């Protein structure tokens, strides 16, 4: 027996620390309800549980998405139910008008009701909305083909113009226009000094704001701070022996007016001021001297009557608005190309066939044409992964697409004429086709709805099972952990008591020396 080291006390203390650590872990699991509270508890289990959490969140959100899709379909199908009823009424009236027991006055009265029903079908397609989206006018996911003619024939307008917005009032058709001049930014150019360090104190004016610099200052750094203060966002590029600074935005409101003795301090000369300019667009075939009014065309390339277009241009962004609520916004693509030192300010217009075109000088003669002809589906994200989606096709179902009316030369013309027996006979065939079209769309929407309801049920079951799997991995088994807590608590108290006994052993050994 020795007194230099109290081995029993050290062993008891180690056991007490282990029991205390196990007791703390058990208390944490019981208090949080989670078996895994940090990566050290179960690194692999934590990784699996986190993946299951991501999957569970996606499944729950996808289930809600599918439910919203069902609501959208129900909204569309409810509107089409009314369209179906009106078409059925119109067919009954056509059968009635086809009978020669009716007089011309009788058929005239029938035509009045028919015209009202046609207008209502047309209005239903335009005003049926879900979440402020019109869902029966085919605007779902509009695809627009843009072409450009730069003297070599029409080619896809890659990089020439980016379409920003199309309102729901724009009908299928086209918007032809000519770019007479693209908007340009304001810029200044000056020879690059060998040294930007100021040789003396000085000052300068930038857009009528005074700024000062001291001897030894970096004039370029001072100039950049001045531009930031003046609210000018600059793009700096340098070619052989020349520095060019220009605003990132185009437009006549962009001005860089730099005045002062900087050229004396640095030994350079400055091009003081060059304001920017807005783009100029006109109707296809117009000129700057005799601009032609912009005009929306229908699918037959005939002007749409009753629509007057006006343009609002800000720099390179062009907004075309019509009196019927039409609005098209697009941006002319002007990019900076500092790799070409021969055409300051190094701006190019688009990326057309044959290469980019510099626009240092006024640029004319580019014909653009926006074709609003194709319409795509509504896509519902019905699963937790990127490739889990369902496309819902809801075509345009107004009076024109149902064959009740047509536009010839931009003028509306009815295709259901009830004023004669032959016209009524033709109207019956038109109604049959329209009813068949609406019935087919309703059947397809019903199939989509049934599929989405099955998707919701499947997602809910998957979410339940995923939650159960995650719970098995991460959640605390309260009964087992309570048992462990009691066990570790007893072990800790026993170790604590034994540590007191072990600490008394050296005192007991001293009795042998007496």
Image (cartoon, rainbow, N blue to C red):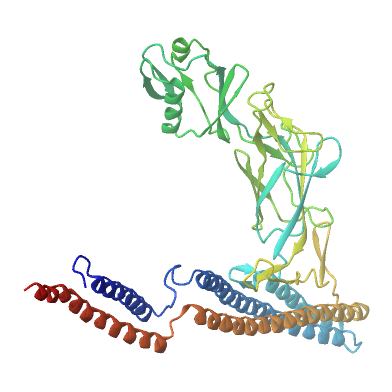
Q: Is residue 366 above or below residue 382?
A: above
Please state which of residues 454 and 465 is positioned toward the viewer in this rendering.
Answer: 465
Q: Is residue 493 above or below residue 367?
A: below
- The answer to whether residue 71 shows anywhere in this view is yes
Q: Is residue 207 above or below residue 192?
A: below
Q: Residue at x 84, y 43 (%)?
A: 154
Q: Residue at x 46, y 23 (%)?
A: 220
- The answer to whether residue 275 shows anywhere in this view is no
Q: Is residue 229 above or below residue 196?
A: below
> Is 437 left, or right, of 220 in this rendering?
right
Residue 105 location (% of width, % of height): 82, 81
Residue 453 location (% of width, % of height): 66, 84
Please state which of residues 274 and 175 is positioned toward the viewer in this rendering.
Answer: 274
Residue 98 location (% of width, % of height): 90, 85
> Is 217 left, or right, of 244 in this rendering?
left
Please state which of residues 169 and 46 is positioned toward the viewer in this rendering.
Answer: 46
């Amino acid at each position: 027996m020795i007194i230099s080291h109290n081995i029993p006390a050290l062993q008891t203390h180690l056991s007490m620390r282990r029991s205390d650590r196990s007791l703390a872990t058990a208390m944490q699991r019981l208090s949080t309800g989670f078996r895994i509270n940090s990566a050290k508890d179960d690194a692999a289990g934590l990784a699996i549980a986190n993946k299951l959490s991501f999957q569970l969140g996606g499944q729950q959100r996808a289930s809600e998405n599918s439910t919203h899709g069902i609501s959208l379909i129900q909204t569309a199908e409810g509107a089409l139910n009314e369209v179906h009823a009106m078409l059925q009424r119109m067919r009954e009236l056509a059968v009635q008008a086809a009978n020669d027991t009716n007089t011309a006055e009788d058929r005239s009265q029938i035509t009045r009701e028919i015209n009202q029903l046609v207008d209502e079908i047309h209005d239903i397609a335009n005003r049926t909305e879900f979440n402020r989206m019109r869902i029966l006018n085919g605007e779902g996911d509009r695809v627009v083909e843009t072409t450009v003619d730069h003297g070599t024939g029409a080619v896809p307008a890659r990089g020439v113009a980016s379409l920003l917005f199309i309102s729901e009032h724009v009908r299928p058709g086209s918007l032809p226009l000519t770019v007479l001049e693209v908007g340009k930014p304001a810029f200044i150019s000056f020879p690059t000094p060998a040294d930007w360090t100021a040789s003396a104190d000085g000052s300068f004016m930038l857009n009528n704001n005074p700024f000062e610099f001291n001897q030894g200052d970096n004039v370029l750094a001072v100039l950049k701070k001045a531009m930031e203060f003046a609210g000018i966002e600059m793009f700096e590029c340098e070619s052989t022996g020349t520095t060019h600074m220009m605003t990132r935005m185009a437009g006549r409101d962009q001005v860089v007016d730099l005045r002062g003795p900087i050229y004396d301090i640095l030994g350079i000369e400055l091009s003081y001021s060059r304001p920017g300019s807005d783009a100029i667009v006109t109707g296809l075939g117009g000129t700057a001297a005799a601009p032609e009014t912009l005009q929306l065309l229908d699918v037959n390339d005939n002007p749409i009557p009753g629509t007057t277009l006006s343009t609002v241009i800000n720099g390179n962004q062009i907004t075309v608005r019509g009196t019927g609520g039409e609005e098209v916004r697009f941006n002319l693509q002007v990019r900076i190309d500092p790799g070409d030192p021969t055409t300051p300010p190094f701006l190019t217009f688009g990326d057309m066939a044959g290469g980019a075109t510099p626009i240092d000088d006024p640029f004319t003669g580019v014909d653009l044409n926006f074709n609003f002809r194709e319409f795509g589906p509504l896509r519902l994200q019905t699963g937790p992964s990127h490739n889990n989606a369902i496309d819902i096709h809801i075509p345009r179902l107004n009076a024109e697409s149902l064959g009740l009316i047509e536009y010839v030369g931009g003028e509306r013309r009815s295709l259901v004429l009830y004023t004669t027996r032959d016209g009524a006979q033709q109207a019956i065939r038109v109604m049959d086709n329209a009813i068949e079209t609406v019935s087919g769309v309703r059947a397809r929407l019903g199939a989509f709805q049934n599929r989405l309801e099955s998707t919701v049920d499947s997602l809910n079951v998957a979410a339940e099972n995923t939650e159960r799997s995650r719970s098995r991995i991460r959640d605390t088994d309260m009964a087992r952990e309570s048992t462990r807590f009691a066990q570790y608590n007893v072990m800790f108290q026993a170790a604590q008591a034994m540590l007191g006994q072990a600490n008394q052993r050296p005192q007991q050994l001293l009795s042998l020396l007496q």
